[in-house]
Image (cartoon, helix red, strand yellow):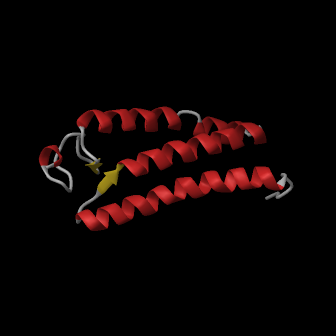
Amino acid sequence: MTWNDSLPWLAVGLVGQGAFFARFLVQWIASERAGESYIPMSFWYLSLVGSLILLVYAIHRAEPVFLLGQLPNAFVYWRNIMLVKRSGLPGSASGAPVGAAGPAGPAGG
């Protein structure tokens, strides 16, 4: 392991990891509150932001494995955001189709 990158770039990488980690905390708290596995919109936004920051960091580091691992993620997260927004719900039950009953019940009400 090397820490020979500049401090600003290390900060970029750590912020990306922090955003990516925060999504797990957000999902856990939302699921505990809902009493079931639940994925709020903030999970998807944190996923998108974290993956884009990590992608930039991977490009800077010129590490092909890291780069290829991050490259498709943003597309998947963006698509999930669009699907959940289209449903009109504030999030989705984990493992359930978008539009299915979540913590607010069917159709968000």
- Which residue is painted at 84% across and 52% down in the image? 6
> Is residue 109 toward the left or the right of residue 5 in the image?
left
Task: Name the spot of residue 5 as percent of width and height, x first.
Answer: 84, 52
Q: Is residue 65 visible?
A: no
Q: Which of the 4 quarters of the picture holds residue 98?
A: top left
Vertical side of 55 occupied by 32: above or below: below
Q: Is residue 16 above or below residue 88?
A: below
Residue 56, percent from left and from top: 68, 39
In the displayed structure, does residue 83 sit left or right of residue 21?
A: left
x and y percentages locating residue 14 in the rendered image: 67, 56
Q: Residue at x 64, y 39 (%)?
A: 55
**Residue in the picture at 74% in, 40% down:** 63
x and y, in percent, of residue 17 in the image: 61, 55
At x 48%, y 32%, the residue is: 75
Q: How many marks?
A: 0
If the image is split into quadrants, where does the N terminus sit?
bottom right
Q: Is residue 44 visible?
A: yes
Write down the quadrant of residue 97 in the picture. top left
